[in-house]
Image: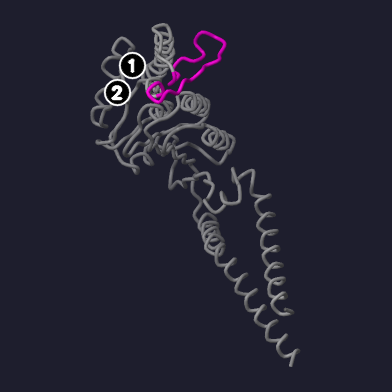
């Protein structure tokens, strides 16, 4: 009787184990089949490869963009780069870093930038590195300016609650912009100089890249935002068009005959982020090992738990 019970429980565990592995396989089957289909299509209908880099959201870190720009540059199969920009901008340093890296790329391979809805501030700083900028007629572009945000002053709020904030610092301007004290005229002047200097760098990049006169910066800079149609008249872009127009321009400027294949770098999936993966190119081997170890541990726990029930 005990042996029959044990056989039934063992059979139940085998079913659970098989279902577990089946679910794992089903998770990866679509990816494998999709890659196989792509490989077959490429073998019979070879296409010229063009890198596509999507600049999206707030630009707070240049690492992802710079790394993939360098990869596209080093890959002899990649003949050009398409920038698809949908961003309101971000930190000046990160945007400038991407801009400078794209300028190096442009020395050897052409770049086309396409803006469908928004390419302003730091994102426009990135776009001007392209050989040719295309946007939809109602896209928002420009916003060539600098915004240095200072935290709201809560000094008086603290005084109302009889809370006194004490600053211990070295350097006259170290606490410039502190929310716990009033800003002095000297501190305000200093921060304004920082903002002005960053702005001067920005308009210089635009002037050089777009062949615009700095004397006319009041027309195209000063933080003004323009539609695609307005930007075209100001020569901030080169063409009004669609994504397909950007593809056609790439083929023209890179002298590509036939069809092209857009190659996009992989973004870290939310699934991989759960396991701490930061970069797919660096984490793939360790991540694969991690998955294998996790599956093994889960399998062992299932056996252990079922065994515990069986012998209790």
The spot of residue 80 in percent (x, y) is 48, 36
Quadrant the N terminus occupies: bottom right
Q: Residue at x 70, y 62 (%)?
A: 297
Q: Which residue is drawn at 38% across and 41% down?
A: 247
Going from N to C along the chain, the mark reached first, 2 or 1, is: 1
User: In the picture, residue 126 is in which quadrant?
Assistant: top left
Closest to the observer, 177 or 11: 177
Q: Which SS class for mark 2?
A: loop
Q: Which residue is drawn at 31% across and 30% down?
A: 141
The spot of residue 144 in percent (x, y) is 34, 22
State the residue position of label 2. 235
Give the residue at the far bottom of this rendering: 1
As measured in the structure, the alpha-carbon distance from the residue carrying label 2 to the one carrying label 1 is 8 Å
Callout 2 crowding tier (Cα within 10 Å): few <14, some 14–19, many ≥20: some
Q: Which SS class for mark 1?
A: loop
**Picture colour scheme:** one colour
Instruction: Give the answer, above or below, for where 201 lies relative to 135.
Output: above
The answer to if 233 sits in the magenta stretch is no
Quadrant the C terminus occupies: bottom right
Q: Residue at x 56, y 41 (%)?
A: 77
Q: Are marks 2 and 1 in contact (CB under 8 Å)?
A: yes
Give the residue at the far top of this rendering: 186
Which stretch is magenta?
Answer: 158-180
């Amino acid at each position: 009787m005990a042996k029959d019970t044990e056989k039934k429980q063992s059979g139940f565990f085998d079913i659970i184990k098989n279902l577990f592995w089946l679910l794992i396989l089903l998770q990866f089957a679509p990816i494998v089949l999709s890659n196989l289909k792509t490989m077959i299509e490429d073998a019979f209908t070879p296409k010229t490869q063009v890198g596509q880099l999507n600049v999206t959201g707030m630009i707070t870190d240049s690492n992802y963009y710079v790394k993939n720009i360098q990869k596209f540059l080093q890959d002899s199969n990649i003949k050009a780069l398409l920038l698809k920009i949908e961003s309101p901008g971000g930190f000046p340093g990160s945007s400038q870093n991407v801009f400078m890296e794209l300028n190096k790329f442009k020395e050897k391979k052409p770049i086309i930038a396409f803006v469908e809805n928004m390419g302003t501030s730091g994102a426009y700083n990135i776009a001007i590195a392209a050989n040719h900028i295309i946007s939809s007629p109602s896209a928002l572009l420009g916003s060539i300016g600098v915004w240095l945000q200072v935290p709201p002053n809560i000094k008086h709020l603290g005084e109302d609650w009889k809370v006194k904030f004490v600053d211990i610092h070295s350097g006259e301007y170290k606490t410039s912009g502190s929310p716990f004290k009033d800003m002095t005229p000297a501190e305000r002047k200093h921060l304004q100089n920082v903002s002005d200097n960053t702005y001067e760098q920005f308009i210089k990049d635009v002037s050089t890249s777009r062949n615009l006169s700095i004397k006319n910066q009041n027309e195209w800079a000063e933080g003004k935002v323009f539609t695609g149609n307005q930007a075209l008249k100001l020569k901030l872009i080169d063409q009004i068009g669609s994504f397909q127009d950007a593809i056609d321009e790439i083929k023209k400027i890179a002298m590509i005959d036939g069809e092209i294949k857009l190659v996009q770098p992989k973004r870290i999936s939310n699934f991989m982020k759960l396991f701490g993966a930061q970069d797919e190119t660096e984490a793939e081997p360790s991540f694969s090992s991690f998955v294998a170890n996790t599956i093994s541990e889960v399998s062992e726990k299932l056996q252990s738990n079922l065994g515990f029930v069986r012998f209790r």
